[in-house]
């Protein structure tokens, strides 16, 4: 056999292997958590309520991240459920005892949780922060009955693209996340400053990235994009200008992708925040009250319709 054919065959095999590793996750088993979380769920209920809100926190976050928005909704007469997602931890040591965040694991957990609530309530509002909002969109498209509405807070449907055009290394890491997941468990990242933590009232872990979590999220978002057209309930999407974690173009992708008759986009002004990534919005001290007011107004709008 000519040498050039052998070289081409080897190159084709390596290319196919790289594509399989980086564009699929069937080879990556979902993690098994010895326990769901060491963080307590937040549940606020009142006798007689027939409406509920299910709030989903972000990767590396905890239910405390969503407490402010949950309590605001409770004041509107809704029962509130903020479960700790599988692996949710306050400390890195606790997370290592459990499992890193995984899109498939989170989606399966929250789907079962939602179906349980649907048996008890007439309507359910979904509110999700970052990847929690992405999961909420996919869930809304695939469950019956659909939720009363979906609210997303800086939620991605894609995590690569022009947002990272000046960050070649980060874009490359995202595109080759599968290969990184094969060879690395943890990647150290820059920790938030004390000022940033206070600004966003942060609850969760920081300073570490899990390649398997990134790859699971990247593949999971492909399913979210495919599911968007099936979302028919009202949608309210928030994003802050200057978000350094998830590109602001995602708010437009969500609005264009869903089939909802009512879609509201709200871009938040965080020019006063010069210390955080402007991504964690649900508890952000500069905009959390504004977000709560917008959600209240949105619910009134959808009720009127």
Image (tube, rainbow, N blue to C red):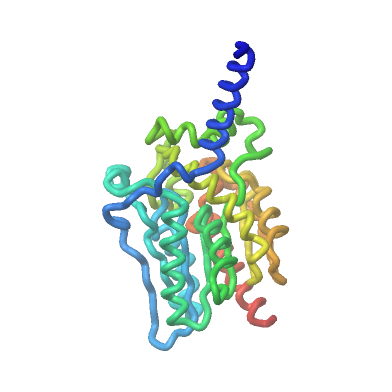
Residue shown at 42% from the left, 88% from the top: 48
Residue 134 percent coordinates (x, y): 55, 56
Q: How many marks?
A: 0
Residue 215 percent coordinates (x, y): 49, 42
Image quarter in which the C terminus is found: bottom right
Q: Is residue 291 left or right of residue 192?
A: right
Seen in the picture, residue 2 relative to 239 is either above or below; the reply is above
Image quarter in which the N terminus is found: top right
Q: Is residue 251 or residue 282 the one in the foreground?
A: 251
Quadrant of residue 263 in the image? Answer: bottom right
Q: Is residue 202 left or right of residue 223?
A: left
Q: Residue furthest bottom?
A: 48
Q: Is residue 178 or residue 160 the one in the foreground?
A: 178
Residue 273 percent coordinates (x, y): 56, 46
Residue shown at 56% from the left, 43% from the top: 245
Q: Residue furthest top?
A: 3
Seen in the picture, residue 105 relative to 274 is either above or below; the reply is below
Quadrant of residue 41 in the image? Answer: bottom left
Task: Tell me if I can see residue 195 in this picture.
Answer: no
Q: Is residue 153 or residue 71 the one in the foreground?
A: 153
Residue 294 percent coordinates (x, y): 61, 67
Task: Tell me if I can see residue 281 in this picture.
Answer: yes
Q: Is residue 48 left or right of residue 21?
A: left
Residue shown at 47% from the left, 84% from the top: 50
Residue shown at 55% from the left, 76% from the top: 145
């Amino acid at each position: 056999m000519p040498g050039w054919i052998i070289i081409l065959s080897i190159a084709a095999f390596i290319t196919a292997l790289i594509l399989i590793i980086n564009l699929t996750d069937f080879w990556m088993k979902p993690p098994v958590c010895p326990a769901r979380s060491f963080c307590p769920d937040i549940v606020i209920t009142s006798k007689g309520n027939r409406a509920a809100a299910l709030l989903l926190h972000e990767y590396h976050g905890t239910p405390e991240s969503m407490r402010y928005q949950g309590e605001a909704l409770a004041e509107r007469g809704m029962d509130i459920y903020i479960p700790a997602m599988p692996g949710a931890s306050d400390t890195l040591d606790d997370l290592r005892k459990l499992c890193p965040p995984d899109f498939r694991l989170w989606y399966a957990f929250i789907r079962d949780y939602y179906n349980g609530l649907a048996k008890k309530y007439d309507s359910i509002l979904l509110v999700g922060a970052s990847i929690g909002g992405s999961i909420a969109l996919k869930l809304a498209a695939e469950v019956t009955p659909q939720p009363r509405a979906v609210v997303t807070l800086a939620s991605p449907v894609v995590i690569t693209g022009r947002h990272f055009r000046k960050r070649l290394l980060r874009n490359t890491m995202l595109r080759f996340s599968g290969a990184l997941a094969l060879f690395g468990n943890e990647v150290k990242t820059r920790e938030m400053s004390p000022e940033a933590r206070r600004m966003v009232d942060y609850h969760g872990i920081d300073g570490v990235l899990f390649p398997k979590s990134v790859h699971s999220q990247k593949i999971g978002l492909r399913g979210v994009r495919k599911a968007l057209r099936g979302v028919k309930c009202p949608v309210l999407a928030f994003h802050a200008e200057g978000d350094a974690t998830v590109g602001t173009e995602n708010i437009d992708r969500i609005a264009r992708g869903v089939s909802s008759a009512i879609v509201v986009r709200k871009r938040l002004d965080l020019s006063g925040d010069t210390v955080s990534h402007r991504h964690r919005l649900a508890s952000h001290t500069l905009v959390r009250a504004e977000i709560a007011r917008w959600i209240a107004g949105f619910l009134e709008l959808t009720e009127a319709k």
